[in-house]
Image: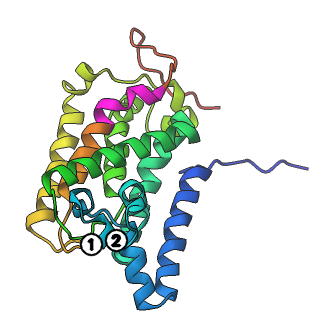
Amino acid sequence: MQQRPTHEPVFNAPTVVLALIGIMVAIHVLRLLVSVNADDWILGAGALIPARFTGLAEQLPGGIPAIFTSPVTHMFLHGNAPHLIFNSLWLLAFGSAIALRVGAVRFLAFSLMTGLVGAALYTFFNWGLITPVVGASGAISGLLGGVMRFLFRAFDYGGIHVLRESPRSIPLMTLQETFTDRRVLAMIAIWLFLNLISVFGHDSLDAGGGVAWEAHVGGFVAGLLGFGLFDGQWPTQRNKKPKLRVVH
């Protein structure tokens, strides 16, 4: 009997990434099922509200505990279905690349770090603001920043398929290499331009009615600069010529 050839999927989605997307979807569905008052409380208690940190925490949903929980919980809440879908797709793309390379635990730690940095920068620039902010965009921007450290090296070492087939074999760009690589600089410029358009040219997908660009920038910079701390000691081949893909 002839054995059927096996084909790997074009894009592997790690379980941890699918689980995060599932949690975000479940929370959004739950908010649609509960009463308006209950949904308002969930949003108020879970959203990032800078005013919590200026003495108003007891007057807001969630009280004092939300000071510590909301910088994390706001990442799992979304303003509407398009906002959720958009973030889920980006999480699937950038999150999968990171998770396949560093594993589930480091992926979660890295995502949390970039999301918290994004939240902190947003709070700093909007100190005392009472408008709630929700969404995983800060953390996802951080994932994109991390991917920039090895995405184009994958092209150099055989093609984008290496991200899926052998992600740990791709040498990590040093920060010096990152900021001198024209491809990376072009991607950063495009990302900044798209954020500029979203701030001044279109309505936000966030519940507060404005794009939290500070969280995007904070997360992205944290991911770009800090990914090496989470990457581990992967094999590097900086002094070798790029690999060619071997056809079996």
- Apparent side of residue 245 relative to residue 89 in the rendered image (left or right): right
User: What kind of residue is marked 1?
Assistant: Leu
Q: Position of residue 118 (x, y in %)?
A: 28, 49
Residue at the limit of the structure toward the top, as seen here? 239
Q: Where does the image place residue 217, in percent across and percent down from the top left?
A: 21, 47
Quadrant where the C terminus lies? Answer: top right
Q: Which residue lies under the disc numbered 1?
A: 205
Q: Earlier in the sequence, mark 2 or mark 1?
A: 2
**Alpha carbon separation for disc pair 2 and 1:** 5 Å
> As displayed, is residue 35 above or below residue 156?
below
Q: Is residue 217 visible?
A: yes
Q: Which residues are magenta?
A: 223-231
- State the residue lying farthest toward the bottom: 35
> In the rendered structure, are the residues bearing label 2 and label 1 in contact, judged by CB atoms less than 8 Å apart?
yes
Residue found at the very far left of the displayed protein: 200
Q: Is residue 93 left or right of residue 223?
A: right
Question: Element under label 1?
Answer: loop
Question: Can residue 78 be seen at all in this image of the molecule?
Answer: no
Q: How is the image coloured?
A: rainbow
Which three-letter amino acid code belongs to the residue tagged 2? Answer: His
Residue in view at x 31 percent, y 72 percent: 60
x, y percent for residue 65: 42, 60
Closer to the camera, 125 or 151? Answer: 125
Instruction: Give the overall secondary structure of the magenta segment.
Output: helix
User: Pointer 2: what residue?
Assistant: 83
Give the SS element for disc 2. Answer: helix
